[in-house]
Amino acid sequence: MCLGGVVVASFAIAWVGLNLYVQSQGTQARIQQELSQRIGAPLQIRSISATPWGGLTLSGIRIGRAAPGNANDFLDAKSFHLHVRLVSLLSKSLVISKVALFDPTVVWPQDPDGRWRLPEASPTPPRQAPAAPPGAVKPPKVRAHLVPEVRRVKLTGGNFKFLDRSGKLTAAFSGVSFHAGVQSPLALNGSAKITKASLRDRFFVDELRSPLHYDASALELPKISARIGHGDITARFSIQPEKPDSPFNVGVEFRNVQADQIVSEAGGPKGMLQGKLDGKLQAAGKTADPNALIGSGEIVLRDGQLQQYSLLVALGQVLQIEELTQLHLQQAEAKYHLTPGLVTVDELVLQSPNMRLSAVGTITFDGKLQLDAQLAVNDNVRAKLFKPIRDNFRPIAEPGYSALAFQVGGTIDRPRSNLVERMVGRDLKDLVSELFGGKKSKKKPSTEPSPAVAEQVTPTPAAADTSTGATPTPAAP
């Protein structure tokens, strides 16, 4: 009993002494300085304590600003647990078997060169030893600095925000957790989980998981699985944050994604497009320049339905074609490629049982449309049209179908087309415009959209002169 009490008392005394040691101003400053140099960033610690079960705990961790003029700290964390080999505190090596960071918030802005870089630590000027007078005894050697050696890293409850050079949110990640083995001071191999991610507050991803590799040259997520719009995503992503403009590569495949949710989250009208999306995208770009994206992709809509598109609804009501008011799509797919600032639509097809809408053209990254389109109907629908309208649909190569070419301009939010004018001819245009709720045109037709329909626009120079009611025979889509 006495021997056991002595052991316990000795252990308690030793532990109190250890706490006094790690909490001393000199030791705390030394650990703070060495960790700052190790990660290459100015790190501040509010307090340090040690327990037998939790190792060394650093509380109130802050890492300074990542870019000049930014008001936010780069990192602010609730606590930072270091499981340290205690004997190493008394040697030249600080062996940290595990680092656990809890509830960190990271705000990471781009620097003026478009790179995401860690805050730079202010170099500590070397101390100048006073000159020894002749014959004086040599001063004792200064003890070498601690050399931290981290073995494993764990992060839970993280929130990350990446800002562009103007301070606008580029990407956000919440509920971040990862664990990794450390191979060198700035090289990690492990796995990551993210509860929710968003890109420019318009594209949202849930339940993201992937292996993770990070070093000074790149961050790689080579095997991503996630959920988007109640569908599934598999992807790979890599970024070189230290290079100018932070170039990246991404490959994505998705399936069973709810189209309506994606459209509405991106800012489009809710309920316009129903169905499930499958597709893929291969792209490369620079995070500092959203217009620098290049690549290609395709999208297929299954069980699709297009509704609440005012032009088609109005045409369907006037022409008494119910199918136009709600297009139940047998086929809906798009193939495209990306060049800086531009999406080129190589093929867009929306096919219902009795008609087909197709288009090719371009969409700028800010949403401006320039599409050459074609509306094709089968003989059953054509026979129901008024004769002046029916005559403007000309037979095409596909048996049993006739088509009408038109152009689409404006923007994604406010598309404009000359479909009505091409369909009814200039002589009947005013009458149809009035039926749609517009005003009869005078000498200078208004270019503003009619509230009831997607806007009519003056035909492009490539469009035929409709003053005689004649139109060219459009090519088959």
Image (spheres, grey):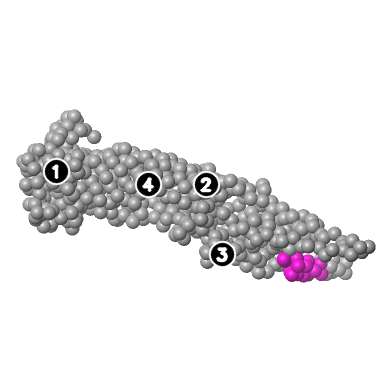
Q: Quadrant of the N terminus?
A: bottom right
Whole-percent x, y for residue 417 in the image: 20, 48
In the displayed orientation, state which residue is furthest to the front.
134
Instruction: Name the foreground residue: 110 vs 18.
Output: 110
Q: Foreground mark, 2 or 4? A: 4
Residue type at tag 1: Arg
Q: Residues within 10 Å of mark 2 (few under 14, many from 20)?
A: many
- Mark 1 / mark 3, whichever is N-terminal: 3
**Residue 198, how many percent across, how many down?**
44, 55
Q: Identify the residue under disc 4.
A: 341
Disc 1 to disc 3, C-alpha distance: 59 Å
Tag shown at residue 422: 1
Distance (Cα) linking label 4 and label 3 = 33 Å
Q: Is the Cβ of the residue at disc 2 closer than 8 Å to that at disc 4?
A: no
Q: Amino acid at mark 2?
A: Ile
From the top left corner, tell me how far across and down residue 135 is, in percent.
Answer: 94, 62
Q: Earlier in the sequence, mark 1 or mark 2?
A: 2
The label number, if any, that marks residue 73 in the structure image: 3
Q: Nearer the viewer, mark 4 or mark 3?
A: 4
Residue 411 lies, with reference to residue 17, above or below; the image says above
Q: Nearer the viewer, residue 268 or 179?
A: 268
Residue drawn 8% across the image and 43% down it: 467
Tell me if residue 255 can be seen: no
Q: Secondary structure at mark 4?
A: loop
Residue name at image x 39 percent, y 39 percent: 296
| x 9%, y 46%: residue | 426
Distance from the alpha carbon under mark 1 to that under mark 4: 30 Å
User: Along the polypeptide, which appears first: circle 1 or circle 4?
Assistant: 4
Question: Is residue 280 located in the magenta-colored stretch of the structure?
Answer: no
Q: Quadrant of residue 294?
A: top left
Q: Please tell me which of labels 3 and 2 falls first in the chain.
A: 3
> Which portion, as a residue range, is magenta?
12-29
